[in-house]
C-alpha cells in the first residue's frame, strides 16, 4: 500500500524540478520514404511497410508504444509515409510472403524528411506459417481529455465479462452488483459510442478492445446519463488489409465456461467483421444483515444470513461490414443478437429478537427462492461517413436501434419455526428499446481553428408487466394481490443539438461549446389510469476548455462542464420488490433529474523515459441529487410496519478532490499504472429529514503491475482499495434479473471500506500466435462489500462476499494473413499475394 503513494510523491517532486525546461512550440512533422527491393535489386510491390515507435500522439498528447502508420509499396517498390512527429525514435517493419521480415530503426535527426534508400528483403526458407507481432500496444494511455485502457492487453479479464474489464480501469470501481463508479459518481456507459440495453455481465471481455474514460465530456457528448462523465466500451474491429481473427475457450472453478471467436477480412472495397461467443457463469453470494429497529412495539433486533447462486448462460453474434464507396465515402452496417437465461436461487434465514420490557422473545423463518429469467437482445446500426478534400473535414450520419425483451417467474417459500408455511409468486414480462439518430460535422476553418456541430434524437421506451400472487399453504390456492400487480410503461425522449469551436493561439488552446437538449419523460400505470411526466423543453449545457502547452512534454487544462442525470426506469417504477422481506425496494415516479456543474484543472507530464503522470483537482456541485432514502410504512400484504428503500431528491451535494494517475516503467520489465483519488463529499438532505447532512473524506487507490518474465511468460497483479464513502452510485439497471440491487447515493449512511487483489499469469507460444492465461480473482477472499445505515427508526449493517478466489483458465489463438486480393476475382498471373501478419 505504501509504494504507490511514495512513487507518486517522488514523481511529483521530479515534475516540479523539470517544470518549464522546454519552451512551448508546436511539434513539427516529417516523412520517411524509400524503396523495397529483393536480393537481385528488383522492386517488390505490395509489400507491407509499417512504422512503430513510442512517440507523443498529436491527437491525445500522450505517449504511446504502438503501430503509428503503414501502407503497401507501389508496383515499383516505393513507399512514402508522412505526418510522423520529427522528435522520437522509430522502427520500420517490412514484410512480404516468401521473405524474412526486415526491421530498420531510424530517426529524423532534426530534419523534416528521411530517405532510407533501397531496403533489401532476403528470401526466407520458412515463412508460410509464421505469425509475427510487430508491436505491442501499451496497456493504458493517459491524456488530458480521457484515459484509454487496452482490455485486450489485460491478462486478468481473459475469459471474463465487461465487469472484470472495467474494474481494472484507472478511475473506475465496480461493486458486486456491477455498479460502476467514476470518482464516486455514476457515469454514462456506452458501447461503441451508443447507448445499449445490455448489462455489463452480458458482454464478454474478450470482445472488448479498449475502455475510454472521459471525466469532463464536452458539448459534443450527451449531457444526460451520468453526472460523473462517460465510460465508452470499444468493441474489437480491425481494418488491416487481409484477414485476421482469434479463437478462444476457457473455464473457471465455479463451473463457468466461455468460447468464442472473431474474424476480420478486408479487401480493397469491403471490410467485414464478425464475432460470436457462448458463455456460462455462476455467481455464489454470501451475505449478512444486522438491524436494530427503534420503531414499533416492541423494538426488535434482526439477524439475517443468506446464500444465493445465480447460474447464467447466454450467447451472442455480431457482424457488420464497412463498404468503401470511394476514397472519401464509407458506409458501415452492423447488427447483433443475444439470447440468454439466468436462474437465481437462494436461502435467507431471518432471526428476530423482540425486546419486550419483561424479556426477549425470538422467532425465525427460512425463505427459499427459485427464479427463472429469460431475455433476448438485438441491435442494428447504420453509419455513413464522408471526408472532404480539406484535411480534417468530415460529415457523419448515424442510426442505431437496440431492443430487449425479458420474462421471468419467481417463487418464494417461507417456512416459520412455528410450523406455518406461506408462498409468494411473481410473474413478469417486459421490453425496452433505444432508437438513436444523429448527424455530426467537423469543419476546420484554418490550420488553427476548428468548428464542430451536430444534432441527435434519442427515443427510449420500457414496458413492465408484473403480477403477484400469494398462497397461505402447500396447496394450489393462489390469490392475486391486485395492489401489487401493475403494468408500467414509460417513454423518455431527448432531442439535442450542439455547436463548439476550438482555436490554437501559440501555446494556448481554447474550446467552447453549447449543447441544447429537450427531454420529455412519460410514465404510466396503465391498469390504474395513473400517469406522470417530467418535461424540460429546453436545457442548456455549456462547456469550456483552456489548454496551455508548457513545453513538448508538459501541459495544463482547465475544464468546465454542465451535465444532467435523469431518473432511470427502475428508479421511477412504483413496484415493491418483495424478494427480500427485510429490505423492500420501490421506485419513485416523482423523481426529478439532477443537474451537475463540474470544474477540473489537470496537469500532464510525459517524461523523456516514457513515463506519464496525470494530476487533476476537481469540484462538482449537484442540485436535486437522486439519493436512496429509507422510510417506514404499514404494509397490508405483510400485515406489519416495514422499512422501504426508495429514491428521493435531496437539496444539493458537493464533492471536491484530487486524482493522480501515473504510468511508469521500471527496469525495462515492470510496467506500473497507479491511480489515487482523494475527495470530500457533502450531502444536504435536510429537505427529507431535519438536520440530515453527511460530510465525509474518502480515498480510492488502484494499482496494476505487469511483469515481463523470461520464456514468453507475463505476470499481472491488480489491487484496489476503497475507504468508507458517503455515497456510491447505482448504474446497473439489470432488467433481466429483476432490476435494482446494490448500493446507491444515500445521506443516511456509508459504504464500508474494501480491498482486493487479482493475479494472472500468461504464457505465449507458437511465435506469439497463442496464449494460455491462468488468473485468480480476489486472491485473499477480501472483496467483501458492506454498508452502514443510521436513521431515527433503525440502524443496519450489511456485508456481502461473492465468488472469492475464483480460478480461470483461458486459451486464445490468433491468426491472420495479409492478402490484397480478398473480395476480388483471383488473377493467377499476379504473384503479389502479401505476407502473413497479425496485429499486436
Image (cartoon, grey):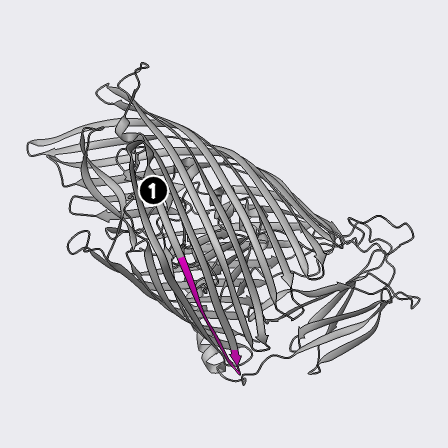
Q: Is residue 652 above or below residue 249?
A: below
Q: Quadrant of residue 708?
A: bottom right
Q: Is residue 612 above or below residue 155?
A: below
Viewed as shown, does residue 183 lie left or right of 252?
left
Q: Position of residue 360 (x, y in %)?
A: 12, 32
Residue 768: image x %, image y %?
A: 69, 52
Q: Which image quadrant: the N terminus?
A: bottom left
Asked if one can make out residue 762 in the rendered structure from this viewpoint, the answer is: yes
Q: Position of residue 809 (x, y in %)?
A: 58, 42
Mark 1: few/some/many CA within 10 Å (<14, 14-19, 20+) = many
As for residue 515 lying within the magenta part, the answer is yes
Write down the region rendered in magenta.
504-517
The secondary structure making up most of the magenta span is strand
Please say whether residue 763 is one of the residues in the magenta stretch.
no
View extreme (left): residue: 358
Depth order, front residue of 114/157:
114
All told, the count of numbered labels is: 1
Percent across and percent down for residue 326 are: 72, 59
Q: Which residue is mark 1?
A: 523
- Residue 814 lies, with reference to residue 388, above or below; the image says above
Residue nearest the viewer, comparing 788 with 179: 179
Amino acid at each position: 500500500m505504501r509504494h504507490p503513494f511514495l512513487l507518486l510523491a517522488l514523481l511529483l517532486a521530479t515534475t516540479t524540478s523539470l517544470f518549464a525546461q522546454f519552451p512551448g512550440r508546436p511539434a513539427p512533422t516529417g516523412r520517411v520514404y524509400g524503396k523495397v527491393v529483393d536480393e537481385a535489386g528488383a522492386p517488390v510491390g505490395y509489400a507491407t511497410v509499417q512504422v512503430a515507435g513510442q512517440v507523443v500522439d498529436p491527437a491525445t498528447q500522450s505517449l504511446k508504444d504502438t503501430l503509428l502508420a503503414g501502407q503497401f509499396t507501389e508496383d515499383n517498390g516505393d513507399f512514402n509515409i508522412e505526418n510522423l512527429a520529427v522528435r522520437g525514435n522509430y522502427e520500420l517493419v517490412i514484410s512480404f510472403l516468401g521473405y524474412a521480415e526486415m526491421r530498420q530503426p531510424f530517426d529524423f535527426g532534426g530534419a523534416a524528411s528521411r530517405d532510407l534508400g533501397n531496403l533489401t528483403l532476403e528470401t526466407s526458407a520458412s515463412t508460410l506459417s509464421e505469425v509475427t507481432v510487430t508491436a505491442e500496444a501499451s496497456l493504458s494511455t493517459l491524456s488530458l481529455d480521457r484515459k484509454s485502457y487496452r482490455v485486450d492487453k489485460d491478462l486478468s479479464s481473459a475469459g471474463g465479462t465487461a465487469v472484470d474489464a472495467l474494474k481494472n480501469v484507472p478511475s473506475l470501481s465496480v461493486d458486486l452488483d456491477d455498479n460502476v463508479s467514476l470518482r464516486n459518481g455514476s457515469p454514462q456507459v456506452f458501447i461503441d459510442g451508443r447507448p445499449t440495453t445490455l448489462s455489463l455481465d452480458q458482454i464478454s471481455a474478450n470482445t472488448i478492445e479498449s475502455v475510454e474514460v472521459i471525466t469532463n465530456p464536452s458539448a459534443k457528448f450527451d449531457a444526460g446519463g451520468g453526472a460523473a462523465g462517460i465510460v465508452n466500451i470499444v468493441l474489437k474491429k480491425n481494418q488491416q488489409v487481409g484477414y485476421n481473427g482469434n479463437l478462444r475457450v476457457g473455464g473457471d472453478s465455479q463451473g463457468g465456461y466461455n468460447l468464442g471467436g472473431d474474424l476480420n477480412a478486408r479487401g480493397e472495397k469491403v471490410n467485414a467483421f464478425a464475432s460470436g461467443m457462448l458463455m456460462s457463469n455462476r455467481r455464489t453470494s454470501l451475505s449478512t444483515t444486522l438491524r436494530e429497529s427503534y420503531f414499533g412495539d416492541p423494538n426488535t433486533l434482526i439477524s439475517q444470513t443468506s446464500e444465493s447462486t445465480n447460474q447464467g448462460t447466454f450467447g451472442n453474434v455480431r457482424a457488420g461490414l464497412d463498404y468503401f464507396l470511394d476514397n472519401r465515402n464509407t458506409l458501415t452496417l452492423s447488427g447483433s443478437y443475444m439470447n440468454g437465461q439466468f436462474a437465481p436461487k437462494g436461502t435467507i434465514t431471518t432471526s428476530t429478537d423482540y425486546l419486550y420490557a419483561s424479556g426477549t422473545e425470538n422467532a425465525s423463518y427460512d425463505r427459499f427462492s427459485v427464479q427463472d429469467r429469460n431475455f433476448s437482445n438485438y441491435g442494428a446500426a447504420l453509419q455513413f461517413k464522408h471526408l472532404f478534400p480539406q484535411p480534417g473535414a468530415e460529415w457523419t450520419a448515424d442510426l442505431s436501434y437496440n431492443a430487449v425483451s425479458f420474462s421471468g417467474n419467481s417463487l418464494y417459500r417461507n417456512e416459520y419455526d412455528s410450523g406455518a408455511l406461506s408462498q409468494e409468486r411473481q410473474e413478469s414480462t417486459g421490453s425496452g428499446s433505444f432508437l438513436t439518430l444523429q448527424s455530426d460535422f467537423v469543419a476546420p476553418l484554418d490550420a488553427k481553428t476548428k468548428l464542430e456541430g451536430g444534432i441527435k434524437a434519442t427515443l427510449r421506451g420500457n414496458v413492465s408487466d408484473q403480477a403477484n400472487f400469494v398462497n397461505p399453504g402447500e396447496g394450489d390456492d393462489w390469490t392475486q394481490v391486485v395492489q401489487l400487480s401493475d403494468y408500467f410503461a414509460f417513454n423518455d425522449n431527448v432531442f439535442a443539438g450542439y455547436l463548439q469551436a476550438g482555436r490554437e493561439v501559440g501555446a494556448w488552446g481554447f474550446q467552447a461549446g453549447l449543447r441544447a437538449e429537450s427531454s420529455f419523460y412519460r410514465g404510466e400505470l396503465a391498469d390504474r389510469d395513473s400517469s406522470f411526466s417530467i418535461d424540460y423543453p429546453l436545457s442548456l449545457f455549456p462547456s469550456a476548455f483552456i489548454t496551455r502547452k508548457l513545453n513538448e512534454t508538459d501541459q495544463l487544462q482547465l475544464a468546465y462542464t454542465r451535465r444532467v442525470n435523469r431518473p432511470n426506469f427502475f428508479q421511477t417504477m412504483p413496484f415493491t420488490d418483495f424478494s427480500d422481506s427485510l429490505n423492500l425496494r420501490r421506485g419513485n415516479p416523482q423523481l426529478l433529474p439532477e443537474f451537475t456543474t463540474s470544474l477540473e484543472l489537470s496537469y500532464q507530464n510525459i517524461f523523456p523515459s516514457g513515463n506519464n503522470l496525470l494530476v487533476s483537482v476537481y469540484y462538482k456541485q449537484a442540485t436535486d441529487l437522486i439519493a436512496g432514502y429509507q422510510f417506514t410504512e404499514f404494509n397490508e400484504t405483510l400485515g406489519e410496519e416495514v422499512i422501504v428503500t426508495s429514491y428521493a431528491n435531496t437539496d444539493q451535494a458537493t464533492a471536491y478532490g484530487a486524482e493522480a494517475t501515473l504510468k511508469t516503467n521500471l527496469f525495462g520489465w515492470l510496467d506500473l499504472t497507479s491511480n489515487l483519488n482523494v475527495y470530500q463529499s457533502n450531502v444536504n438532505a435536510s429537505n427529507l429529514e431535519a438536520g440530515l447532512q453527511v460530510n465525509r473524506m474518502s480515498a480510492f487507490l488502484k494499482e496494476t503491475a505487469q511483469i515481463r518474465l523470461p520464456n514468453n511468460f507475463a505476470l499481472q497483479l491488480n489491487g484496489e482499495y476503497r475507504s468508507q464513502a458517503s455515497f456510491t452510485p447505482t448504474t446497473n439497471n439489470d432488467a433481466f434479473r429483476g432490476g435494482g440491487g446494490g448500493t446507491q447515493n444515500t445521506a443516511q449512511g456509508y459504504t464500508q471500506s474494501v480491498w482486493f487483489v487479482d493475479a494472472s499469469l500468461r504464457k505465449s507460444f507458437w511465435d506469439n500466435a497463442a496464449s494460455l492465461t491462468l488468473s485468480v480473482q480476489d486472491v485473499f477472499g477480501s472483496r467483501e462489500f458492506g454498508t452502514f445505515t443510521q436513521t431515527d427508526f433503525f440502524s443496519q449493517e450489511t456485508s456481502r462476499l461473492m465468488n472469492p478466489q475464483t480460478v480461470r483458465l483461458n486459451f486464445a489463438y490468433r491468426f491472420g494473413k495479409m492478402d490484397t486480393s480478398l473480395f476480388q476475382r483471383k488473377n493467377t498471373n499476379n504473384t503479389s499475394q502479401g505476407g502473413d501478419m497479425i496485429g499486436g
